[in-house]
Image (cartoon, rainbow, N blue to C red):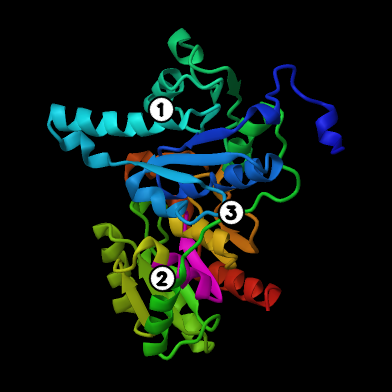
Amino acid sequence: MNPDQLFLPPDAVPPGDLRRVLVIKLRNLGDVLLTSPVVSVLKRQVPGIEIDALVYADTADMLRGHPDVSQLHEIHRDWKQLGLLDRLRCEWRLFSVLRRRRYDLILNLTDHGRGTRLARLLKPRFAVGPDTRTEKAYRSAYTHLYPVIGGNRRHTVEINLDALRRIGIYPGVERHLTLIPGDAAVASVDQALSRGGLKKKSFVLVHPGSRWFFKCWPPDRVAALCRSLASQGLPVVLVCGPDPLEQRLLESVKSQAGTIVAAFPGNLSLKELAALIGAARLMVGMDSAPMHMAAAMGTPTVAFFGPSGDIEWGPWQVPHRILTSTHTCRPCGKDGCGGGKRSECLEVIELPQALAAVTSLLEETR
């Protein structure tokens, strides 16, 4: 017997009572990817179980193809733009599908009103949610509430896994991220790299942007880092998402660096981005979804952290370096110093620090 199983909470859920589970994570790309260990751990601890997931449609590729997800249900954010009747039809269709699945357990991993409503309306035998609210209507929707230890003291993956610990299901040693690019995405990226004369694991992938500028290292310094890497014989590839700010940052870096082998300015699908990250020797990026994707793909990562917490959101179980400052006010979680959209804790990081981080990580993972 696993020693952990000797000590169970008094209201632990018997694994034999679980036939079908719904995991709800209604947040952004990185948040959804960081829930993948919950699915893997649950499947490993209760092998015969069926595990469904409910996410926003634009984040579904983070879990699509996960070998332990039985069904992936999606909510479209643009439902809010529909007329009342059309929106109600969409909501009812989704609810009807979920109700037919007859879940024994719901794991709501976000303090989100929809997840709470579903925990009540779907009437599972067990429902687990974050212990973040005191309202009776919220708390009564769940049979179990798990503590959320924030303040940059615990990684988000571990906080998610606390939902399982709360009901007596313990993770064990393996709790890796799972992201499956798929054969089509891998083939597409292989062709793109071949056109650029690049081989897998021969280049450094740089993701200079984020949807929020206050999370970004200044583009002139990113460009200087790219030039330094190129001078050492390391091909540099740039990538960004479709957000206009990210694209502007990429173009700024590209124009200043002048030594970029290839660039993907927001023209990759999420699965193709995963494949590209998996093909890189190393990735340099900001605190954003691609950084978490690099961890899932096993790609060594150098990550810049400003206002956000590196303990809570850093690269998970992959060789990495964190670049940040010693400002006593960080991580503040604010949109730049004084709300001014610029973060001094990022701007004080100099090129030699970044170059040293990349060099040491390359040597470590040679």
Give the mark, 3 or 1, whose residue is nearer the N terminus. 1
Verify whether residue 285 appears in magenta: yes
Residue behind mark 1: 99
Relative depth, front residue between 289 and 212: 289
Pointer 2 local density, CA inside 10 Å: few below 14, some 14–19, many at least 20 = some
Give the mark, 2 or 1, whose residue is nearer the N terminus. 1
Residue behind mark 2: 185
**Which kind of residue does numbered mark 2 sit on?**
Ala
Element marked by disc 3: loop
Residue 329 visible in the displayed image: no
Q: Residue furthest top?
A: 136
| Residue 92 x/y as whole percent | 27, 28
Tell me the quarter of the picture where residue 257 sits. Answer: bottom left
| Residue 189 x/y as whole percent | 41, 77
Which residue is pictured at 57% across the width and 17% down the height? 143
Residue behind mark 3: 177
Relative to 170, say whether 355 is above or below.
below
> Which mark lies nearer to you, 2 or 1?
1
Give the mark, 2 or 3, whose residue is nearer the N terminus. 3
Numbered range of the magenta stretch = 272-288
Q: How far apart are the two marked residues, 2 and 3, measured between alpha carbons?
A: 19 Å
